[in-house]
Image (spheres, rainbow, N blue to C red):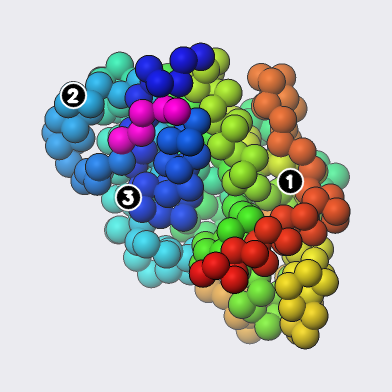
Amino acid sequence: MDTKKIKIYILGASGFLGSRCADYFRLQGFQVFDNRVDILNPSGMRDAFSAVKPDVVINLTGAKAYPTIDWCEDHKEETVRVNVVGATNVMLAALEAGAYPIQISSGCVYNGGPEREFTEEDEPNFHGSFYSRMRIVLQDILNELPVLYARIRMPISKSDHPRNLINKIVSYSRVISIPNSVTLIEDLWPALGHLIETRPFGILNLTNEGYVEHQQILEAYKKIVDPGHEYELISLEQLEGSNGIIKAKRSNCVLSMKKAKSLGISMPKLTDKRIEDVMRVYKSSLKQS
């Protein structure tokens, strides 16, 4: 693949994922375009894509700069506008421009223990938050179109950022520790590069194999970054119950990577050793910020 000839238009390039996505593909030699466009203005997007003539369009936009699942409960109209209508607009405009459309979305549409890994064919079974219900709506819409619908979960990174899973959980004094899929974003970008070359369509899980528990990340943080860090493990009932500390329920699940592996994608399991390796680089990024 001659990367210098491939034009990628990234929407949401100022965010946590989008900025790192743009940096990665620029380093790989792709022509990256990240001019801001209004995803609620289809004609404006058509004009932007017509001017650039991208080969690939990647949508990484989201409602609000730093939304939370509880925020979506109180801002349903904006969540629908951006996460459903806006995302659909992007994919339709990309198809009209003749580009390969990639929607980065969430696998937070299931709930179940690690004994069952959810595949792309499994019907969503989690409706406990407005955020997740709207992800299901978007998934149903885009699954009818020739679009790559890539599902990630709990993005974790080697670099310091408020949206990094590491930053999030170390900011809480009380946490649950339940098996969940996570996506190491430094593994995500090479996977997307491979998909850009092979161009499959449909729903695709893009998480690291296996699962991680929050306690694993927190213990690695204590060992590598801050030995004095303290936290309390609580139950799911304490988190979500009638006297819980969150407004909406949370999806806890493990996604299958069988389909992704069949497409030649490798996103290895985050073992304790690998988490510690990530944490060492993360610690270095704290010194630079």
Q: Amino acid at mark 2?
A: Ser
- For marks 3 and 2, give the one nearer the viewer: 2
Q: Residues within 10 Å of mark 1 (few under 14, many from 20)?
A: many
Instruction: Identify the secondary structure beneath mark 3.
Output: helix
Give me the disc on residue 50. 2
Q: Which residue is mark 3?
A: 82
Which residue is depicted at the point 60% across and 46% down? Answer: 185
Q: CA distance from mark 3 to mark 1?
A: 26 Å
Q: Amino acid at mark 1?
A: Val
Q: Which residue is mark 1?
A: 254
Which residue is depicted at the point 79% across and 74% down? Answer: 222
Percent of width and height locating residue 85? 30, 43
Percent of width and height locating residue 251? 64, 56
Q: CA distance from mark 2 to mark 1?
A: 40 Å
Q: Residues within 10 Å of mark 3 (few under 14, many from 20)?
A: some
Q: In the rendered structure, which disc, 3 or 2, sits on the residue that comes first in sequence?
A: 2
**Magenta residues?**
29-33
Which residue is depicted at the point 53% across and 73% down? Answer: 247
